[in-house]
Image (cartoon, rainbow, N blue to C red):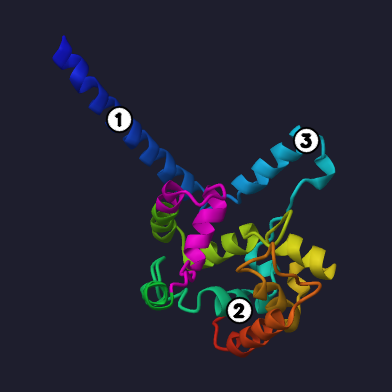
Amino acid sequence: MEKQKKYKWPVRILKFLLGLFAFTLFQVASLRFINPPVTPNVAWERVEAFVKGKPEKQPVYRWKNIEQISPHLRRAVMASEDQRFLSHRGFDFNEIQKAYNSLIREKKLRGASTISMQTARSVFLLSSRHVFRKLAEIYYTVLIEVFWNKHRILEMYLNTVDWGTGVTGAEAAAQKYFSKSAGALTREEAALMTAILPNPHKWSVKNPSAYIRMRQNQIMKAMHMMPLI
């Protein structure tokens, strides 16, 4: 009897892991064709706003197909966030090496997340700095690179990325910052919007600092080298 109980837990754990694996496969595969009605962070913030009795402060989330988003913005995010987006399979090992060298030599932690990794984070996970969340991000990045093409990954990214407090995705951001649709953004507006993405809760589109203007100019210089997806 004791031996039977001893073997039950490993079997249960294995069944749980297999079930979780099957669920995540279905989850990622289905989103290849279905647009997510909401992101985990938006859902969480809406629940918080409801609980606190402040429904008017619910985050904005508006889906747009990639063809409805300005080509300038599509090029800008690749120029700024992931210039090797089309050539890697989810992980940019050149950037990872640079981040490692920066940490060792300068004791500075710099980002090495690709568009695919950021998409996995925003579509499937809540914001957190926990190690398990990072592992889940890596896992989902592998899955979306298997099941989605680059067109779909970029479309998901543009619609789900955090663009400031209460603002998710390109359409909501374009409406907030420029009072226009994401499809009507100019080259300068797209570069300015993209310039704040590394820290959208600290940096401002409406009141850009000299540093943000510098980033905007750098992005505009690199945009012409980016392919249009």
> Image point 71% across, 38% down: which residue?
48
The range drawn in magenta is: 107-136
- Where 139 falls versus 219 (above or below)? above
Q: Nearer the viewer, mark 1 or mark 2?
A: 1
Sequence-wise, the earlier of marks 3 and 1 is: 1
Q: Magenta stretch containing residue 130, yes or no? A: yes
Nearer-the-camera pick, 155 or 14: 14
Tell me the amino acid under the disc marked 1. Answer: Ile
Residue 13: assigned label: 1
- What is the CA distance from the residue labelled 3 to the residue labelled 1? 38 Å
Q: Nearer the viewer, mark 3 or mark 2?
A: 3
Tell me the amino acid under the disc marked 3. Answer: Lys
Q: Position of residue 214 (x, y in %)?
A: 67, 85
Q: Position of residue 7 (x, y in %)?
A: 19, 22
93 lies left or right of 79:
left
The residue that mark 2 highlights is: 75
